[in-house]
Image: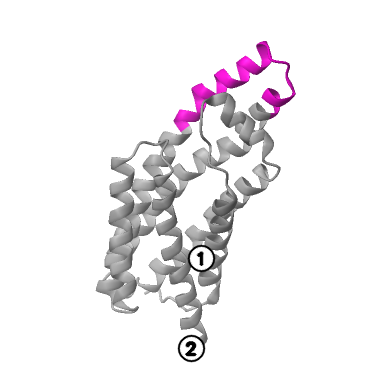
Amino acid sequence: MLVFRRSPFYGLCMVVGAFLIGIAGLYHPVLTGDGAAQLGTIAGTAAWRTIHWALAFGLPFLYAGLVGVALRHSETPAGNQARAGVMIAGFGFALWAVNILFMVGAGTALARAYQIADPGLTATRAVFLYDMVHPFGLAAERLATFTLGLALYLYGWTVINGRAWPRWLGWAGIGGGGACMVVAVVVPETAVYLYYGQGLVVAWCAVAGVLMIAETRRA
């Protein structure tokens, strides 16, 4: 029988991932207007690549922490729920990474081409390509928001049924996950409210990470 041995590694991963994504999200500019306006905003944001690489590297840290939460509850009555949650979360993070990697790669290149090109064919092509491809990334991020909300909902029930952590954290996961799913269904993928839903997931992970670290220190 596999026995989970408490280690600060998973809690630290969770906190680092939440920190990277949280700080990057705060500095991320809001993209509004048509494709040309958004490319102009991207080109005018000096830390654009840094922001998105922080988001990208924060994802594996956050997911590693969620794996630790699942392992922590593997020997409790909620072991099956924990395993389901971690698998669904993996799918959600993969979807979330699609738009992040598009913006750090193709988005940066198209913005640079639009910025340095004369108002002619090259700039027009850059805007056209951006307008054609960016909606795919936004659609992936909308589905990622719903999927992560579902995973957080399962993690909430895991905490409640596992009885290893405070029940308020479980109810927070259920409430936050439910709100995240509702937001993803109701609002369009271009709405900024999707990021608020993702913020609920990141905030819950930050609290869970601190709890894991504190639990390790007590042990």
The residue carrying pointer 1 sits among few (fewer than 14), some (14 to 19) or many (20 or more) residues within 10 Å by Cα, namely many
Q: Residue furthest bottom?
A: 218
Secondary element at image label 2:
helix
Instruction: Determine the residue positioned at 29% across, 76% down.
Output: 167
Q: Tag on residue 204?
A: none
Q: Nearer the viewer, residue 152 or 69?
A: 152
Q: Amino acid at mark 2?
A: Arg
Spot occupied by residue 12 in the image (x, y as percentages of width and height): 55, 70
Instruction: Determine the residue positioned at 30% across, 54% down.
Output: 179
Above or below — where is 171 with respect to 36? below
| Predominant secondary structure, magenta span | helix
Above or below — where is 117 with respect to 98? above
Query: Residue under circle 1?
Result: 14
Identify the magenta region.
Answer: 112-136
Side (left or right) of 138 relative to 186: right
Q: Tag on residue 218?
A: 2
Above or below — where is 178 with respect to 41? below
Q: CA distance from mark 1 to mark 2?
A: 18 Å
Any part of residue 200 in sight: yes
Instruction: Determine the residue positioned at 51% across, 34% down.
Output: 32
Kindly indicate the quadrant of the structure image that contains residue 104: top right
Q: Nearer the viewer, residue 187 or 100?
A: 187
Instruction: Determine the residue positioned at 56% across, 62% down.
Output: 19
Spot occupied by residue 213 in the image (x, y as percentages of width and height): 51, 78
Q: Amino acid at mark 1?
A: Met
